[in-house]
Image (cartoon, grey):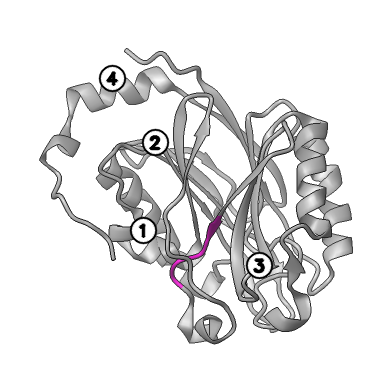
Amino acid sequence: MSNKPDIELALIQTTLAWHDPAANREHFQALLEQARGADLVILPEMFTTGFSMESSVLAEPEDGPSSAWLREQAQRIGAVICASLIIQAADGSYRNRLLWARPDGSVAHYDKRHLFRMAGEHKHYRAGEQQAVFDLKGWRVRALICYDLRFPVWSRDAAGTDLLLYTANWPGARRQHWNRLLPARAIENLCYVAAVNRVGEDGKGHGYTGDSQVLDFQGEALLAAGDGDGVFRTWLSSEALSAYRERFPAHLDADVFTLN
């Protein structure tokens, strides 16, 4: 049996103002108030700008206004908040960086590993090199970003991830891929999956159909946001996860590998 508490997730699926960080922060502040009480709140990828290749224009420093805002909001609502944004790292490189802002004011991060070459992302950002595992009340949470979803090796964690988390700007043109790959990641990793996408249209005319969702370890939907705009909440049961892994311990037969 598990000794971890159950946790509540709040997924914020909404539109994004194109290239307007201040407007997006204001928009999300009201939505975050609705998410109060959750343990973890997840925002879409590049939540301050939309999915943009104008990294040199839009990048904020590591301690910039949006990073500070995320810390303040996490402290205000008493929850971990995670979202990606465009960051200029200390080494001068531009990163699509997910920030994991805790209520105590501390922040950890994950840099997107797989850059979406079909949009030229690899020409404007530097890829991350390290997986990141975050602790949330004893839960092992691994946060990934959008295109990472297509790469099952990077999504695997032999040490036992409890929750895989994807934050995205996944276009409606490839909606079917999103909805098929997410259950596969849950099933193969014997873990929960939470995925947050945006809705609306971006400054390039690409449409987004949402489909933010939370899946259990068998790929069954616990939450399905469809194309709605707002805050969507659900609970994850630690006991149910532990019991399933005991009944069906496929992870014990997993292949051993290392990542370069």
The quarter of the picture where residue 171 lies is: bottom right
Q: Amino acid at mark 1?
A: Leu
Q: Main structural element of the magenta stretch: helix, strand or loop?
A: loop
In the foreground, 204 or 78: 78
Residue for point 88% across, 62% down: 23
Find disc 1 in the rendering and name its residue.
Answer: 181
Find disc 4 in the rendering and name its residue.
Answer: 243
* Labels 4 & 3 near each other (Cβ < 8 A): no
Q: Earlier in the sequence, mark 1 or mark 3?
A: 3
Residue 252 vertical placement versus 57 (above, below): above
Residue for point 55% across, 25% down: 7
SS for tag 3?
loop
Query: Which residue sits furthest left?
Result: 253
Q: Amino acid at mark 3?
A: Ala
State which mark lies toward you, 2 or 4.
4
Which stretch appears magenta?
A: 110-114
Residue 126 is left or right of residue 40, and the answer is left
Distance between mark 4 and mark 1 Cα atoms: 24 Å
Residue 90 shows which numbered tag?
3
Q: Amino acid at mark 4?
A: Ala
Distance between mark 1 and mark 2 Cα atoms: 14 Å
Q: Amino acid at mark 2?
A: Asp
- Residue 11 visible here: no
Label 1: how many residues lie within 10 Å, few (<14), some (14-19) or many (20+)? some
Distance between mark 4 and mark 3 Cα atoms: 44 Å
- Residue 177 visible here: yes
Residue 177 vertical placement versus 248 (above, below): below
Q: Earlier in the sequence, mark 2 or mark 4?
A: 2
In the foreground, 32 or 77: 77
Residue 216 shows which numbered tag?
2
